[in-house]
Image: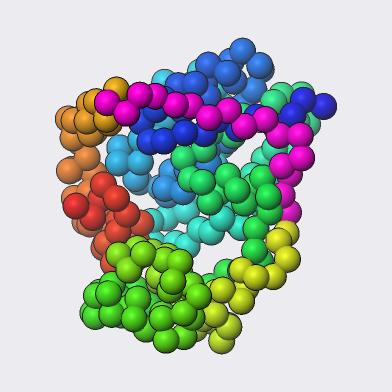
Amino acid sequence: MSPLLFIVGPTGVGKTEAGIRVARLLNGEVLSADSRQVYRHMDIGTAKPTRAQRAEAPHHLIDLVDPDEGYSAGRFSRDAVRVIAEVRARGRRSIVVGGCGLYVRALLDGFSPTPEVDGGVRERVRAEAARVGVEALHRRLREVDPCSAGRIRPSDRQRIARALEVYEATGEPMSSWQARPREGGIGEGAVVVGLRMERAALYARIEKRVERMISEGLVEEVERLRGMGYRPEGSALGTFGYRE
């Protein structure tokens, strides 16, 4: 059995193109490990593979949930394991292309069994974030879960909200859930390829990428999402590139 192949690296280094080339060479299919490409309607700002690129090699784990739905590393790992088995049953090879280190680690090493959170709890926490601001939310997290608060940057709205959601839904701090034995993990025998690039060249690529996103309609995409009722404080619109 061929080992599972991961292609990882910083934003803008060329993971998507590399994944497609490798998939074509190895009779493979691409699994996206990007934490934002799972969201529907968010195409330009997340740099999803284009239709032309997806025609070159099958892609999976893209456009799974709406922007105001939760999606965790644990759920990603479970979905990825299922897709990998389906790809293997077709006699093909899975190429995991990773933009999110948390998702890659969850698939390689397993994940803490944190629970899924009811939508009503999520709505309350996100509404509180909009009302009091992310710094006040971080102070409240420090009161109920100082371990998580110490690991999460005070400006990281999504991770702060997620930790508070878990606490409110279960009565247990996120840190206690994360201390439990990990589940899953298929890292044994995996091959991880890290892409690197000289910093100045990488920054130049990122600048061109941002310019291309704007020319392709990033501002209009954000306006369309807001018109659909999504807001930064309660959805994936609060992530980098959209909230600005």
Residue 44 in the image: state x and y as whole percent. 30, 37
Residue at (42%, 55%) from the top-left corner? 66
Q: In the rendered image, is residue 205 in sight?
A: no
Q: In the rendered image, is residue 85 in sight?
A: yes
Residue 85 in the image: state x and y as whole percent. 75, 38
Q: In the rendered structure, does residue 3 fall within the stretch colored magenta?
A: no
Q: Nearer the viewer, residue 240 or 176?
A: 176
Q: In the rendered structure, does residue 193 fall within the stretch colored magenta?
A: yes
Asked where in the image residue 182 lies, by quadrant, the reply is bottom right
User: In the figure, is residue 7 to the left or right of 11?
Assistant: right
Residue at (36%, 64%) from the top-left corner? 153
Q: Main secondary structure of the magenta part?
A: loop
Residue 154 in the image: state x and y as whole percent. 32, 68
Q: Nearer the viewer, residue 18 or 92?
A: 18
- Which residue is the extreme one toward the right? 1
Residue at (27%, 30%) from the top-left corner? 203
Residue 27 in the image: state x and y as whole percent. 66, 17
Q: Is residue 24 above or below residue 83?
A: above
Asked where in the image residue 11 lies, by quadrant, the reply is top left
Q: Which residues are magenta?
A: 184-200
